[in-house]
Image (cartoon, helix red, strand yellow):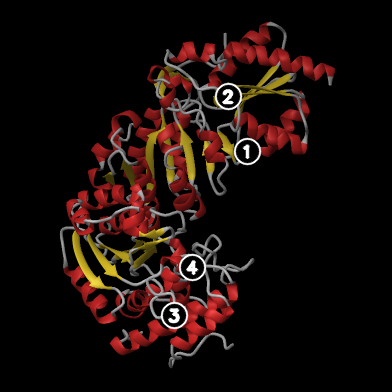
Amino acid sequence: MPKYQIKEHKATRLGFGEALVELGHENPNVVVLGGDVTGSVRTDLFMKAFPDRFFSVGIAEQDMMGTAAGLAVAGKIPFASAYGEFATGRPFDQIRQSIAYSRLPVKICASHCGITVGQDGATHQSLEDIAIMRVLPHMTVASPCDYHQAKKMVKASINWNHPIYIRFFRDNSPVFTDANAQFQFGKADTLIDGSDVTVIACGLQVWEAILAEEILSNQGISVRVINMHTIKPLDADTIIRTAKETGAIVTAEDHQKHGGLGSAVAEFLSQNLPTPQEFVAVNDTFGESGLGEELMKKYGTDKDAIVKAVHKVLKRKKSS
Amino acid sequence: MKSFETSELKEMARQIRRDIIKMLMISKSGHSGGPLGLAEVFSSLYFNILNIDPKDPKWEERDYFFLSAGHLCPVWYATLARRGYIPLSELTTLRKINGRLQGHPAPAHTHGIPGIELASGALGQGLSVAVGCALGLRLDKKPNRVYVLLGDGELDEGQIWEAAMTAGHHKVDNLIAIVDRNYCQIDGRTDKVMELEPLVDKWKSFNWNVLECNGNNVENFVLTIKRAQSLKGKPTVVLARTFMGKGVSFMEDDYKWHGVPPNEEQGKQALSELAPTKFGDFIEF
């Protein structure tokens, strides 16, 4: 049995949409921008509840980011939302100048991230968004592991007075965290303790890591599983401690290997405590159409890939 | 502050031109042509039109001004200094390290100065921001107005027209966009680089009110903005005809002065064409 139980299956994007409605009731300054795909990114819930505070900008993500920045200048708390690639890649320059450099607390919330968006194919599989948001000064980057955490993260974001990017996934995914669990940006959750190796994961790969831990524990390997929901700023204390205590790291994410969570961890450890590390991520290639599960297997981001990476890093740990 | 009358606005415009020339002579870097062409527009905005308080740049009742074409900032810095947002002496620090007068403008809470709400420089972004700001103010039923200045070359950017559509769609009538229509951009005349005409029809077809005026004539400009303020139900754009390099004979209407500063000799020549004013220079040389 895995150490956590699946309570139900729900999408992280739904957690986002529901949190927005709650925030709408709690704070009259919360406003939401829509770029036509409201039903998909689940801002439709807010739109129906608060039509006056919902602004449609049409299929125009560059304009959406600028409009959000302007709403922030006027004292509003704007949430701008689109699919991952169109919320980051397309309006990158607008986010860079009008939001990040201008240091406006806009919440950029992207749904349909990662290869698991599946059958829509490579154009819609956002695998670069962590990298290009993480590189921006002033920007916070976060990725919740399930529906409950998505909800808590969105609710916490309104007191986070920085530009922030949060990535969600389309598909229903296991809900395994506690609805009442604490959440704090920049404070990672150690979900399973272990001493041989640490799997640091974010998003959907957190559940995969939990499944991998079960397999590995049956093989006599003690795995620590950490949910690094905030990729920037990284929880430096937790990473240093776990690198010291376990001496081997596997990172796992639904993103390109270059520039994602794995890169962030490697950048940090190489400067502070060089530690053998393996990356579970899409390896410098575009995706293709297929079911999310099939793609995770083919592109090496599922539990089996984590198990393999753990074996590999443990060999390196022994020989180092 | 009491609003300036026409004669004072004109004199302030001339002083702003002298300030721009001196700033650029000191920095040896920056844009000459566009800023010089906008002296009347900025003098009119900051000494007559905008409801602002330099002592309290974040005053809640303020009008919001966004400069979308960030490279025009020398005229903005000079104007903000003249209006009391920053010390006049700071105009010597344009584009200098550890200074606040960035090559392209930034707000005080990043690297920049009070009175600036948003970073600009990458073109095409300011209209979207102004629309968002206007929507936010309207939501709170506040009377503040939002102004944004766009370059005409900047209208090549697609985002401008996305924002124009959004403003028209939402009938954002607490917003006035001003286009610096000088027909010049870096590579040449705007009709050679990218034809903008029929420009009036373009804005109209995006559901905007369109007014045209002489942006180098303070009376005409102020009257046109007052007229724009009275229009309801749609956003309004003012196409302000200006001349790049206005006031300096050898720069006037010449796109080659878009992005270069005058050298020592050219600067002295320019100053000799712009008579000193009662406001006084920020530095003597």
- Do the CB atoms of the residues marked 2 and 3 lie less than 8 Å apart? no
Check the residue under mark 1 and report the chain it is in: A
As measured in the structure, the alpha-carbon distance from the residue carrying label 3 to the one carrying label 1 is 49 Å
Residue A280 in view, yes or no: yes
- Do the CB atoms of the residues marked 4 and 1 lie less than 8 Å apart? no
As measured in the structure, the alpha-carbon distance from the residue carrying label 2 to the one carrying label 3 is 53 Å
| Residue underneath mark 2 | A284
**Front residue of this view, candidates A115 and A44:** A115
Q: Earlier in the sequence, mark 3 or mark 4?
A: 3
Check the residue under mark 3 and report the chain it is in: B
User: Crowding near pointer 2: few (<14 within 10 Å), some, many (20+)?
Assistant: few
Q: Is residue A71 above or below residue A141?
A: below
Q: Residue furthest right?
A: A319
* Dot label at residue A137: none
From the top left corner, tell me how far across and down residue A158 is, in percent: 44, 46
Q: Amino acid at mark 4?
A: His
User: Crowding near pointer 1: few (<14 within 10 Å), some, many (20+)?
Assistant: many
| Residue underneath mark 1 | A234
Q: Amino acid at mark 1?
A: Leu
| Residue underneath mark 3 | B17
